[in-house]
Amino acid sequence: MLQLGDRAPTFTLYDQNRSKWRLAEQRNSRVAIFFYPKANTTGCTEQATGLRDIVPDIGRVVVVGISADPPEKQYAWDEKHQLGFPLLSDPDSKIAKKYGVFGPKKLYGREYQGVTRSMFLISPAGRVERAWLKVSPKATPIELMSALESADE
C-alpha cells in the first residue's frame, strides 16, 4: 500500500482519445488521480461530474480518471457528461494494482476482483500528498477541495 510521501508509481496509459498520457509529463502540476470501477455508471458519474464541477476552482491541479474501461467507452462517457479531463484505460488493472486499489470485493454476496473507488493527490515532485481509499462518489470532490484549501493555508 502506498504511504504519504512515497513516490507515486509512474505510468503511461491511453486516454479516451487514444492519446498517450504520462504521469511523468505532469511534473509542474499537482495531479488528482481518481480510480473508479466502471464508466457511465451512477456512482462513477456522480464522482466524475463532481470533479468536473470543481475543476475551475482548483487552479493548476490536473484531474485524471482511471478505470479498466476501453478508450471508446471512456470517450462516450466523456461526450455524454462533458467531463473535459483525461480518462485513462487500464485494461489489465496494472496501474490500479500498483496503487493498491485492486483486489477482492463483495457485492450482493458475490465475491470478485475489482477496483476500489479511490483518489490520490500527487505533488509536482511525484510524491503521494494525500490518499483516499474507498472514498464515496459524493465525497471525492469535497475531500479534494478540502485538502487543497488546507495545503494553501
Image (cartoon, grey):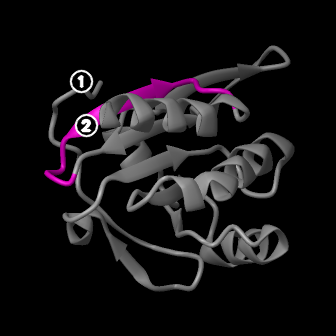
**80 above or below 66?**
below
The span from disc 1 to disc 2 (Cα, nearest Å) is 7 Å
Screen quadrant of the N terminus: top left
Contact between marks 1 and 2 (CB within 8 A): the answer is yes
What residue is at 57 percent from the left and 85 percent from the top? 17
How many numbered marks have been drawn onto this rendered protein structure?
A: 2
Q: Which residues are magenta?
A: 124-136
Q: Which residue is mark 2?
A: 128
**Label 2 element class:** strand
Q: Is residue 80 left or right of residue 24?
A: right
Measuring from the top left, give residue 145's x and y in whole percent: 52, 38
Mark 1 crowdedness (10 Å alpha carbons): few <14, some 14-19, many ≥20: few
Q: Residue at point 19% right, 42% down?
A: 127
Q: Is residue 88 above or below residue 46?
A: below
Q: Which mark is residue 116?
A: none
Which amino acid type is marked by label 2? Val
Measured from the top left, where is residue 38 in percent x and y? 71, 50
Residue depicted at 36% across the width and 41% down the height: 121
Location of residue 63 in the rendering, given as x and y in whole percent from the top left corner: 48, 58
Q: Nearer the viewer, residue 73 or 65?
A: 65
Magenta run includes residue 130 = yes
Residue topped by disc 1 = 3
> Is 92 on the left or on the right of 50, as rendered?
left
Upstream in the sequence, badge 1 or badge 2? 1
Q: Position of residue 108 (x, y in %)?
A: 85, 18
Q: Identify which amino acid the numbered label 1 is placed on.
A: Gln
Residue 76 on the magenta span: no
